[in-house]
Image (spheres, rainbow, N blue to C red):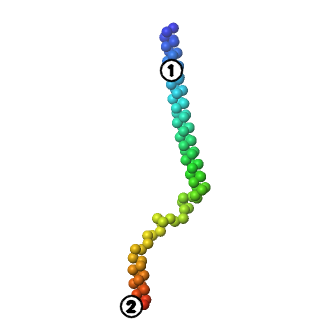
Amino acid sequence: MSVWRSLVERMRETRDELARKAARKVARTALDTAGKAAGSAGKALGRALFGDPEEAPPGPEDTPPPDPFARLKAAEAEKKKTGK
């Protein structure tokens, strides 16, 4: 009878351990899914409030930098016009 009880106890422990592992896996999966859903909702909200980033107007990084010698070139062009 002792052997029978030992086997039954082992089976219960195994069943309980499998149930705990399954519960952890389900919790992780639910957490990952909730995180992905929150991320996509945040992106949708951002698009709704600020527009689509691909359709953004050109920013300062898209325009060429100003010419540092623009004043000198303008002064030389003015001198050539006036003939001095």
Q: Which residue is mark 1?
A: 13
Q: Quarter of the image holding residue 78?
A: bottom left
Q: Residue at x 50, y 22 (%)?
A: 14
Q: Nearer the viewer, residue 47 or 75?
A: 75
Task: Give yes or no for contact between labels 1 and 2 (Cβ–Cβ under 8 Å).
Answer: no
As drawn, which residue projects farthest toward the right? 48
Q: Residue farthest to the bottom?
A: 83
The picture quadrant where one finds residue 26 is top right
For label 2, the crowd category at 10 Å Cα-Cα, with few meaning under 14, some 14 to 19 and many 20 or more, is: few
Identify the residue at image location x=46%, y=65%. 61
> Residue 78, relative to residue 22: is it above or below?
below
The local secondary structure at tag 1 comes to helix
Q: Position of residue 38 (x, y in %)?
A: 57, 45
| Amino acid bearing label 2 | Lys
| Label ID, residue 84 | 2
Q: Secondary structure at mark 2?
A: loop
In the displayed structure image, the side of residue 82 where residue 37 appears, left or right: right
Closer to viewer: mark 1 or mark 2: 2
Mark 1 or mark 2: name the one nearer the start of the chain: 1
Q: Residue at x 41, y 79 (%)?
A: 71
Type of amino acid under label 1: Glu
On screen, 81 above or below 15? below
Q: Residue at horizontal 39%, vertical 76%?
A: 69
User: In 3D space, how far apart are the residues under numbered discs 1 and 2 (Cα atoms)?
Assistant: 102 Å
Q: Left of 8 or right of it: where is 77?
A: left
Q: Which mark is residue 53?
A: none
Quadrant of the frame with the C terminus: bottom left
User: Percent from the top left, x then y, of residue 57?
Assistant: 54, 65
**Residue toward you, 57 or 14:** 57
Q: Establish if 37 lies above or below 7.
A: below
